Amino acid sequence: MNRSTAPALAILLSGLLVLQPTGGPFFQANAQTAAPSLSDPGWPRQIVKNGSTLVYYQPQVDEWNNSQLLTCRIAFSLTPSGGKNVMGVASVQASTLVDKTDRTVVLRNINVTSVRFPSLNASDATSAEAVFRSLVPQGGETISLDRLLADLQNTKSVTKPVVTNNSPPTIFYSASPAVLVMVQGEPVLAKVKGEDIEYIVNTNWDIFFDKSSKSYFLLADTVWLTTKDLKSGWTVTKTLPKDLAKLPPNENWDDVRRMIPPPATTAPVPQVFFSSTPAELILFTGSPVYARIQGTRLLYATNTDNDLFLDNIAREFYILLSGRWFKSAALGGPWSYAGDSLPADFAKIPTDSPRARVLASVPGTIEASDAVLLAQVPTTAIVNRAEAEKSAAVTYVGNPQFKPIEQTKLEYAVNTDQRVIKDGDLYYLCFQGVWFMSTQATGPWKTADSVPPEIYTIPPSSPVYNVTYVYQTNPTSTTVECSHTAGYLGAMVIGVAAGFAIAYGTGFYYPPYMYWGPMYPYPIYHPWPATYGARAVYNPWTGGFAVGHAAYGPFAAAGTSAWYNPATGRYGRAASVQGWYGGRTAASAYNPWTGGYGHTVQGHNAYSQWGSSVATRGGQWVQSGHVATSAGSVAGFRTSTGRAGAVVRGTNGTVIGSNNHIYAGNDGNVYRHEQGGGWSRYGSEGWNQVHPSRPAGEIQSTPRGFGSEERSGLDRSAFSRSRGQFQTNRFHSFQRMGGRFRR
């Protein structure tokens, strides 16, 4: 990894980077080796069987209970063998499995609860219903997650925001080259293997300590700096401790080794900002330059990677950090929380604006609503108990130590990086999105059928709060269904008067666990999740946050830079160079949200998301793929329970064109959306245009009109279907471009 050629934005892959063990159904495969994307082949779809033909249109969502049980209406066209075509409406329930990586929802256990034929008498309707039910797909169906999310905008959903700490972090500002050095608490020094020189574990930069001179040495890009006081006094140096030249290869020191001896460079000397807690840095390339956002009074800064705006009327600055808005009259501060007093013009930012990405963090916008809905959609995995239990393990620093969790009767383990909760005489471990239980703090661990309800009352002020987003249901003797929503990986729903939005972290500061003792050769350091100090930016396609910025160092943030694993006696350090357009990684990575760490060497070209874990993408519970040839496309899926289906050909539907304009009304009728925006209703005489009902006393037009509530509902469904198609197409483009997310 050569920082001199690194992209401006270095994103830390902070998930559990563990490659797939051969034949192991518990851990998921690396994203690069997973099956190709299935996504959504399109609507409407057609099934031909025994001479009968069924054409069914995109489902219209009535309810998605806990994002697991979908209730919907489906308009369809049925032509029985030797009979005439007839239109109908079916009410359907189906359980769902979600693959957030491919933004695909698998509908399984499809149950038709009722069928209506508006143009048929009771006898003919009964016969037609029997034919319809014989054609209903049994293997399962897939639908784009974006189509469901767009339709959910029309339903009543319950959103429970997190009570977060919205106090601003320390915010530095510079118009010249600068770096932000963060050391959580006191420096934790560890020896480089086989050498006398030490390095600081709990920092986001390569910082070494030379005991003989009592000096620190910092490598910032291609420039070496030195000081005797971490907080100030940094100067350029060409003289390095001799032991630095002996750094071992292939242990994430290679980029440092290339800068020894210090190379001749014309790179500017950066200013060093220091913080003992997670902080943020506003960094400009020269003096601030602003551009106007059309249709608003807002200006945005063009020569910074930060999302920084200027209200040109009130003359106030607004900055978005980890999904939270702060404002100030000056770039140098002081800053205050502004999420509940954001100017209305932020919601007017055009969707094609270079700063449209912030709309997901502007309450009241459709983008924010999408983000909130996506955050509440669980990723579900059907986990093999025996395989899961082989991997569950907890290592403590010394004997297990527990502290009370405020507002509960529970306790949590402090001297391990795993989430262990003590409830009376029982212990519960949340390991990579799966719950385990034991009668001892050290195990052995058995897959839990369920967990105590009190766990879900753990407050956000606790460092183990994220486990409240992990659920365990439907246990059998061999499997259990595990699910987690975005909060488990740090994406929280926050609420203000204007509505809801997505943010990163709880805003609370969780001091790291540190231990200096005789039983270990090094001081022990375990970080907890940090909201700030990682330049977290939301990606609407993954529904997660990526982190990292060149000024924040090669390890992105102190909270994720290193850890100590007493089981192996070694420190791990993350080293990842990734940009918005891809990169390569050779790293030991650590995720403080899940407590996962591992090693990987991989290439990628997708914008990464926090917390790639066993249950994040579901590579073992639903594998999907497609083959496209000149003869057409064939797509299918299979789940770990043995269920399988072909979505484009076979027992399920073949996509026929793109004329997806037939709708199921709430009144049980079938409607067609006309090109000019009007509606036609299907009846015994075929299609007839309908108009809004006239006020009482006026002569009613023919054919009979329909009420304003029905018309409004259909108009909303048409808008949602159009937007869902647009978003689905955008995601497909995102995939075809290799996962590029326009920054």
Image (cartoon, helix red, strand yellow):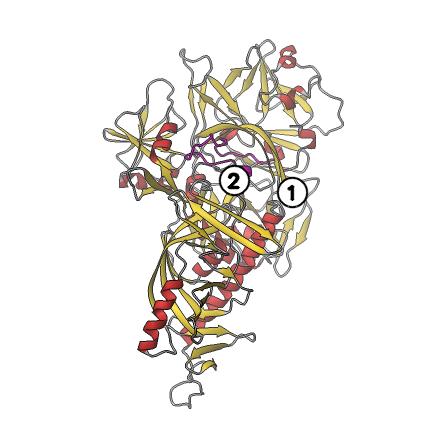
Residue 505 can be seen, yes or no: no
| Circle 2 residue | 34
Q: Identify the element where label 2 is drawn.
A: loop
Left-right relation of 123 to 551: left
> What x and y, as percent, mark residue 350?
60, 58
Disc 1 crowd, CA 10 A, few/some/many (<14, 14-19, 20+): some
Quarter of the view holding residue 178 = top right
Identity of the residue drawn at 45% across and 18% down: 568
> What x and y, as percent, mark residue 736?
61, 49
The prevailing secondary structure element of the residues shown in magenta is loop
Residue 481 can be seen, yes or no: yes
Identify the amino acid type marked 2: Ala
Q: Which residues are magenta?
A: 9-34
- Which label's residue is closer to the chain start, 1 or 2? 2
> What x and y, as percent, mark residue 424?
23, 30
> What x and y, as percent, mark residue 419?
37, 31
Disc 2 crowd, CA 10 A, few/some/many (<14, 14-19, 20+): some
Q: Residue furthest left?
A: 425
Query: Which numbered tag is attached to residue 290?
Result: none
| Circle 1 residue | 304
Quarter of the view holding residue 288 = top right
Identify the amino acid type marked 1: Thr
Query: In the rendered image, which quarter contains the N terminus?
Result: top right
Does residue 32 belong to the magenta stretch? yes
Q: Nearer the viewer, residue 346 or 361?
A: 361
C-alpha span from label 1 to label 2: 36 Å
Q: Nearer the viewer, residue 380 or 305?
A: 380
User: Relative to 416, does residue 731 appear above or below in the rendering?
Assistant: below
